[in-house]
Image (cartoon, rainbow, N blue to C red):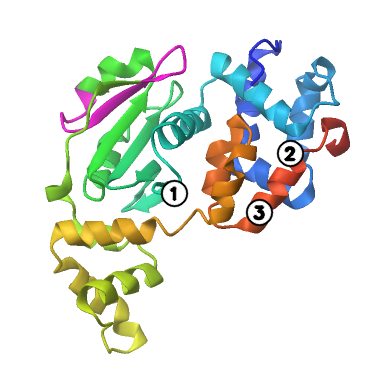
Amino acid sequence: MNENYKIDIDKKYLPSIGNFFSPIVLYSFEKYNSSSYFTEVCQNSELFEKLDLSISLSDFFDMIFHFLLKNYRNEYIYKNIIANKILLGKHSLKTSQILTEFRIGKNKADFIILNGATTVYEIKSEYDSFSRLDKQINSYSKAFEFVNVITSPFQIEKAFYALPENIGILSLTNRNTISTIRKPKSNLENIDLYMLFDSLRKNEYLQIIKTYYGYIPSVPNTKIYSACKKLYCEMPIEKAVKLTNEVLKKRNYSDFIIQQINKVPYSLVAYILSLGNNKTRVEKILNILNKKIIEII
């Protein structure tokens, strides 16, 4: 990132600019090589007038990301910092995996890292409310071994009052580093296999059942779900969680992703990793990122 690059924009446009990193805008670039939303916001905010339009879209996103780090740390900023500093900084894509927006019960976990254990990171940015936090944490505690909440420095005290002591608390500091305020405690014995099963895809739970029992129930297709769920819930928790972790790690990251990650701009690591095994989409977004701004507006 070019940290010396200065951008002067009316603050009313910050939420709109923050949306540049949303899946719908980035997917538009993949599919159409352009984004009407992106162009409109840049024109209205006069961003195009303040930039050298001969720079690549990749450099543009890095500049905008750095600008948002200082002015508008939304949820994506947190996700991307976690991806860069924890997943890539402390782990390896060959042994670890991320899942985003993973549904558990009626909630979706923001960011999950799978390696030897399952660790969830619930993001509460400067612009998020804590109103649903208790329900979210309750769900995550039934599905993941370690649960963390990552928030801004000025919300740390609030987090202490709102969270059980087994939940980890992290802070995205004013220097954009991640500080561990309180480490999470293992939640393995409280995992609810009944709930966790419903977060699995059919091919995943069939693989788990076949691996553990050596067979798949010989029942009509209409009953395979209930039969497998019954068997899954009868497994020892530690074994069920271990096998579940292993199948979930196969959702993403082909060798292609691992080979390409060094080509990904810092600002888009979290987004690219969220595309997982979709080689076609990864190739498309990497290709458009090499184009100059002037070529896509």
CA distance separating discs 1 and 2: 25 Å
State how far apart marks 3 and 2 are (Cα).
12 Å
**Residue stretch in magenta:** 161-178
Quadrant containing the C terminus is top right
Q: CA distance from mark 1 to mark 3?
A: 21 Å
What amino acid is labelled 3 in the image?
A: Arg
**Kind of element beneath mark 3:** helix
| Residue 221 appears in the figure | yes
Q: Is residue 32 above or below residue 181?
A: below
- Whether tag 3 and tag 2 are in contact, CB under 8 A, the answer is no
Secondary structure of residue under mark 1: loop
**Residue 28 visible, this angle:** no
Task: Give the quadrant of the N terminus.
Answer: top right
Q: Of marks 1 and 2, which one's residue comes earlier in the chain?
A: 1
Closer-to-camera residue (241/121): 241
Of residues 148 and 97, which is closer to you in this image?
A: 97
* Residue at which label 2 appears: 289
Kind of residue at badge 2: Leu
The residue to which callout 1 is attached is 94
**Secondary structure type for disc 2:** helix
x 31%, y 55%: residue: 245
Q: Is residue 215 left or right of residue 234?
A: right
Q: Amino acid at mark 1?
A: Lys
Above or below, 276 relative to 79: below
Residue contact at pointers 1 and 3, CB within 8 angstroms: no
Q: Which mark identifies residue 235? A: none
Numbered circles on residues, count: 3
> On residue 281, which mark appears?
3
Q: Point out the tag, 3 or 2, that comes first from the N-terminus.
A: 3
Q: Is residue 170 magenta?
A: yes
Q: Is residue 10 left or right of residue 132?
A: right
Of the two numbered discs 1 and 3 in the rendering, the one whose residue sits closer to the viewer: 1
